[in-house]
Amino acid sequence: MTVTPDRLLEFLGNHWIMAAGLLIVTILLIQDFIDSAFRKHKVVSPAETVNLMNSENTVVIDVREPHEYSNGHIENSKHIPLGKIEERAHELEAYKQNPVIVTCQSGTRSPQACKKLIGLGFTRVYEMKGGMLAWEDQKYPIVKKRNTK
């Protein structure tokens, strides 16, 4: 059976919702491919994060909100909410040439923070894939902030 342009147009007309869905998925896949090809930071898994932390003078930056951070974070991580990265970048000056790993809750805020850090001159920026949800799924330890009154 040969597919002629007329039959293809008839199919698309009869199944326009499916065709639109396919188009949207294709566009999103292309966008993701382009983003990853031109990304200036690397993406690492929680296991790779642990390896970097154990082998080099690495700093982990947690860009979640204060209430998220206090519910559990990576030991010795620096808490700098996403909206305060530029304002508090001076706190990270000593790490400009060192590995800087950025984490958030699920991995959606980290890419923005990585872009900001690269723009501020940090040279070895990593995004932890999956954020703290992935870290906890791997059963890595977390520290919970205690309320002190």
Image (cartoon, helix red, strand yellow):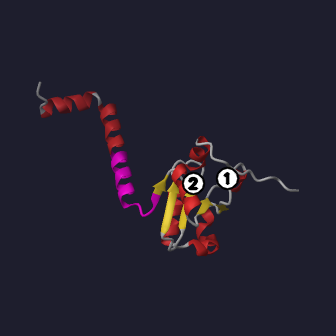
Residue identified by numbered label 1:
73
Q: What main secondary structure does the magenta stretch of the protein show? A: helix
Give yes or no for residue 85 being in the magenta stretch: no
At a point 68% along the width and 51% down the height, the residue shown is 68
Quarter-of-image position of residue 55: bottom right
Residue 2 visible in the displayed image: yes
Q: Give the range drawn in magenta.
A: 27-42
| Residue sitting at x 69%, y 53% | 69
Per the image, the residue denoted by label 2 is: 50
Disc 1 versus disc 2: distance between alpha carbons? 14 Å
Crowding at mark 1 (Cα within 10 Å: few <14, some 14-19, many 20+)? many
Along the line of sight, the residue nearer the viewer: 10 or 32? 32
Q: What element carries label 1?
A: loop
Quadrant in which the N terminus appears: top left
Residue 139 image-quadrant placement:
top right
Name which of mark 1 and mark 2 comes first in the sequence.
2
Picture coordinates of residue 131 (x, y %)? 56, 50
Residue 31 point in image, percent of width and height = 36, 51
Q: Is residue 12 above or below residue 71?
A: above
What residue is drawn where x is 56% and y is 47%?
106
**Which class describes the residues within 10 Å of circle 2: few (<14), some (14-19), or many (20+)?**
some
For the residue labelled by badge 2, is the local secondary structure a helix, a strand or a loop? helix
Quadrant for the C terminus in the image: bottom right
Q: What residue type is labelled 1?
A: His
Q: Residue furthest top?
A: 1
Whether residue 107 can be seen here? no
Name the amino acid type tagged 2. Answer: Val
Q: Is residue 33 magenta?
A: yes
Of residues 4 and 90, the one nearer the viewer is: 90
In the displayed structure, 96 sits above or below 80; it is: below
